[in-house]
Image: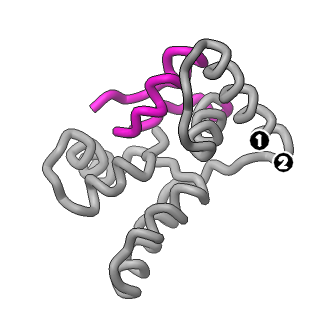
């Protein structure tokens, strides 16, 4: 599974939410968690101190990396965006289309609380773990 920024935020805040529990259990059980560089960037941007950023960086770099292939993955992400737009659904964040393309290319589900993935899931078949 790819853990999206919104799920990492739940985990790092220790909210006790279903997303928090799913990330915690995956880490404890040694189940594979995937992240992309853009997710690492978004999560690190939210760190409140350099100490926290170093700890979070260590955690995230211990996860499996899934990265875009230039230019194919970017073209795939743009296609997903256009398909959603044609279906009358708006994806607000370009990064979410990129994460969706990565999920499809690597046959992974996305753990997220982000509603943009509702459109990606219904129109393009991106598998989303609903929490």
Seen from the viewer's position, the closer of residues 75 and 3 is: 75
Name the spot of residue 42 as percent of width and height, x first.
49, 61
Q: Which mark is residue 7?
A: none
- Tell me: 102 left or right of 10: right
Mark 1, residues whose alpha carbon is within 10 Å: few (<14), some, or many (≥20)?
Answer: some
Q: Is residue 78 above or below residue 10?
A: above
Q: CA distance from mark 2 to mark 1?
A: 7 Å
Name the spot of residue 15 as percent of width and height, x first.
16, 54
Residue 112: quarter of image: top left
> Which residue lies under the disc numbered 1?
74
> Which residue lies under the disc numbered 2?
70
* The magenta stretch spans residue 8: no
- Tell me: 129 left or right of 84: left
Residue lying furthest bottom: 50
Residue at image position (45%, 47%) is 4
Residue 53: quarter of image: bottom left
Name the spot of residue 126 as percent of width and height, x first.
54, 24
* The magenta stretch spans residue 111: yes
- Residues in magenta, as a range: 105-131
Q: Are marks 2 and 1 in contact (CB under 8 Å)?
A: yes
Disc 1 is placed on an element classified as: helix
Seen from the viewer's position, the closer of residues 4 and 45 is: 45
Mark 2, residues whose alpha carbon is within 10 Å: few (<14), some, or many (≥20)?
Answer: few
């Amino acid at each position: 599974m790819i853990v999206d920024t919104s799920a990492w935020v739940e985990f790092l805040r220790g909210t006790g939410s279903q997303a928090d529990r799913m990330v915690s259990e995956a880490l404890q059980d040694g189940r594979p968690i995937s992240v992309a560089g853009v997710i690492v960037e978004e999560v690190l941007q939210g760190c409140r101190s350099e100490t926290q950023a170093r700890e979070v960086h260590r955690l995230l770099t211990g996860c499996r990396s899934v990265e875009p292939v230039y230019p194919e993955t970017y073209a795939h992400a743009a296609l997903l965006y256009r398909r959603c737009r044609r279906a009358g659904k708006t994806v607000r964040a370009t990064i979410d289309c990129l994460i969706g393309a990565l999920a499809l290319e690597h046959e992974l589900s996305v753990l997220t609380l982000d509603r943009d993935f509702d459109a990606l899931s219904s129109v393009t078949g991106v598998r989303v773990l609903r929490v």
